[in-house]
Amino acid sequence: MVVLMEELMEFIQANPDPRELKRALAVKMVMQNYDLSTIGSILGVSLCFVSKWKYIFAEQGTAGLKLKYKGSRGYLDDAQIQTVISRLKQKDYWHLEELKEYRTYALTKNIIHVY
């Protein structure tokens, strides 16, 4: 149990993602014998949330607390991103209509491609 708590504390101290941190804090509080409803109130989560992450931590350790979603593939390649950034830096302020017009223009001239 001490080893698990040490692993959990290292994870909490090294972890910048608030969703993972909330999971870890819920587990830590369970391990410190806080009442589940108290944990829920303090962290603003449901009892199911606390129970779920307690179980996952018991089964998988801190690896189970990590986010699994890594995001989707971007719509623009690196060159297209740089083109858009360069265009945006040309002015301090853009109106939404100007951006819509540029998007239409860039798509028709193959400056950017939407997949």
Image (cartoon, grey):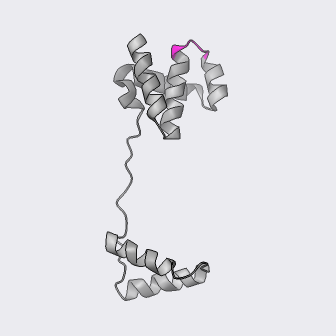
Residue 105 appearing in the image? yes
Horizontally, is 64 left or right of 91 in the view? left
**What's the residue at 39%, 53% (across, down)?**
71
Q: Is residue 71 above or below residue 84?
A: above
**What's the residue at 53%, 29% (across, down)?**
49
Residue 5 in the image: state x and y as whole percent: 44, 17
Horizontally, is 24 left or right of 35 in the view? left
How many marks are shown on the rendered structure? Answer: 0
Instruction: Tell me which segment is drawn in magenta.
Output: 31-35
Residue 1 appearing in the image? no
**What's the residue at 41%, 84% (across, down)?**
106
Location of the N terminus by quadrant is top left
Say whether residue 114 is magenta: no
Q: Nearer the viewer, residue 49 or 103?
A: 103
Residue 109 in the image: state x and y as whole percent: 36, 89
Residue 66 in the image: state x and y as whole percent: 40, 35
Question: Secondary structure of the magenta portion, mostly?
Answer: loop
Q: Is residue 10 above or below residue 102?
A: above
The quarter of the picture where residue 60 lies is: top left
Residue 54 in the image: state x and y as whole percent: 47, 22
Q: Is residue 71 above or below residue 66?
A: below
Q: Nearer the viewer, residue 17 or 50?
A: 17
